[in-house]
Image (cartoon, helix red, strand yellow):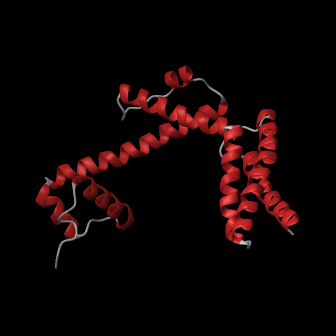
Amino acid sequence: MKNIYRNCNEEDLHAAYLHMTDHTGKVNDELREAISQKFNYDEFVKIAEYRKILVKEKGRVAFEIHNRVQKGENIDIILKNISSEMIGSSELKVFILEKFDQFSKVKENDKLDEETIYKSLLGLVIASVTGLLFLKAVIVSTGQFSFFLLIPVYVINYFVIYGITGKTRDNFVVFMAVLISAIVSTILSFALLG
């Protein structure tokens, strides 16, 4: 019987080893043989277990950064107050900066403020007209309506509203504006084209 792990690279073997030990608690003979043929088995296991611990540590640090960003702490305070025995100081600083940037963008995108509401309402009006014009052009050229046309209308309206607000559909107000504009575009196209 052919060993399915024989042609795997080191990363794939690490992933298979961790997956197998996490789910069954042991490693099957085929995987053990493939690892032993390419690497010192004990060294391989040490590296795999270290990676597993490192991933958990990065998860802990990311969770802590996320909580601090949600509280509104600035990057300097976060850099001072988060430490790790597993991650080197320069690598930790880069990791914190990347996660801070990522979580700050998500927080800003999800923020519901007056500016987002007004821009979404403006976008709703413009996107409804844009969606109507798209539907009208397609219906006039094909002579029929299809509910599959609602997908491109939704996408077109989303990009119009995204362009105006600068926020994604993960923002509740933007999502509702896109949904309502697609519905309004459809209703208006039926009303105008009868």
- Estimate the x, y position of residue 5 in percent, counting from the top left: 22, 66
- In this view, 137 is above or below 126: below
Q: Residue at x 66, y 63 (%)?
A: 151
Residue drawn at 70 percent across, 58 percent down: 153
Residue farthest toward the front in the current orientation of the protein: 141
State whether residue 183 appears in this view: yes
From the viewer's side, name the closer residue of 12 and 118.
118
The answer to whether 87 is drawn above or below residue 49 in the figure is: above
Q: Position of residue 136 (x, y in %)?
A: 76, 61
Q: Residue at x 50, y 39 (%)?
A: 62
Residue 96 point in image, percent of width and height: 47, 31
- Return the residue nearer the eye: 107 or 60: 107
Task: Give left or right: position of 99 versus 26.
Answer: right
Left or right for 154, reference 40:
right
Q: Is residue 10 left or right of residue 188?
A: left
For this view, does 53 lie left or right of residue 156? left
Q: Residue at x 18, y 49 (%)?
A: 43
Q: How many marks?
A: 0
Q: Residue 122: image x %, image y %?
A: 80, 41
The single residue placed furthest to the left in the displayed view is 37
Tell me the quarter of the picture where residue 66 sits: top right
Please state, as top left, top right, bottom left or bottom right, where the C terminus lies in the image: bottom right
Q: For the N terminus, which image quadrant?
A: bottom left
Q: Does residue 169 appear in the picture of this structure? A: no
